[in-house]
Structure formats: structure tokens, C-alpha cells
Amino acid sequence: MTESASPRVSVPRIMVLGVQPGTPPFRIMEIDGEMVCEAKGITDVLLVAAEYGITVHDLDDPDVVRWVGGDKLTWMPRRGRR
């Protein structure tokens, strides 16, 4: 297999991990593999990205942001199943 025939695997610079319990709940945000903040909402993600020189045009673009444990609208812990 040649390199051009191999699948493209993107590693986004921004990773937003699953919701952590707290008051308020938060998600750990990483840039270039380094923890940079506890984001409490989408605005935090955009502001911190801008501080690191990253302009985010589309929060749903997996080449830019990877959302782990939920999407951009997930900011509350999931309730356990009964």
C-alpha cells in the first residue's frame, strides 16, 4: 500500500474530554495534547482556543475539535441508568 492510498487520520489540536462533576460541571480541554483549562461551556472552548492562536470556524469539524463523552452541547453529567 502506498502512502497516498492509506486512510487519512487527523489529530485535532483541540480535545474536549467528558463532563466532570463539579459546581458547575466542567470538561477538561487539551490543546496539542496538553491540559489547558477546565471549560464550563462552548464560550470557554472558543476563548481558550483563540488565546492559543486557533480560530475555530466550525465546532463540529472533527479535524479541528474532538469531543469525547458527548458533543458540543453536553455540559452536564449523564445520570446513571436505573
Image (cartoon, rainbow, N blue to C red):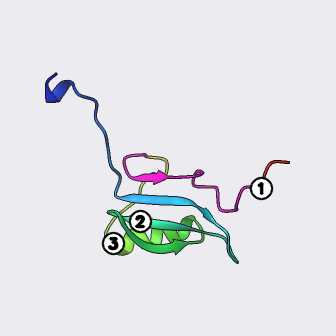
- Helix, strand or loop at mark 3: loop
- CB contact under 8 Å: marks 3 and 1: no
Can you tell which of label 2 and label 3 is closer to the viewer?
2
> Which quadrant is home to the N terminus?
top left
In the foreground, 72 or 20: 20
Residue 10 image offset from top left, x and y in percent: 32, 44
State whether residue 63 is above or below residue 52.
above
- Helix, strand or loop at mark 1: loop
State whether residue 48 is above or below residue 42.
below
Q: Residue at x 70, y 61 (%)?
A: 77
Q: Residue at x 59, y 67 (%)?
A: 41
Whichever of callouts 3 and 1 sits on the residue coming sooner in the sequence is 3
Does the magenta segment cover residue 63?
A: yes
For label 1, count other residues whose C-alpha is less than 10 Å away and answer few (under 14), some (14-19) or many (20+): few
Q: Where does label 1 land, which residue?
A: 79
Q: Where does label 2 land, which residue?
A: 30
Does the magenta segment cover residue 51?
A: no
Disc 2 from disc 3: Cα separation: 11 Å
Q: Residue at x 34, y 64 (%)?
A: 54
Res. 52 mark: 3
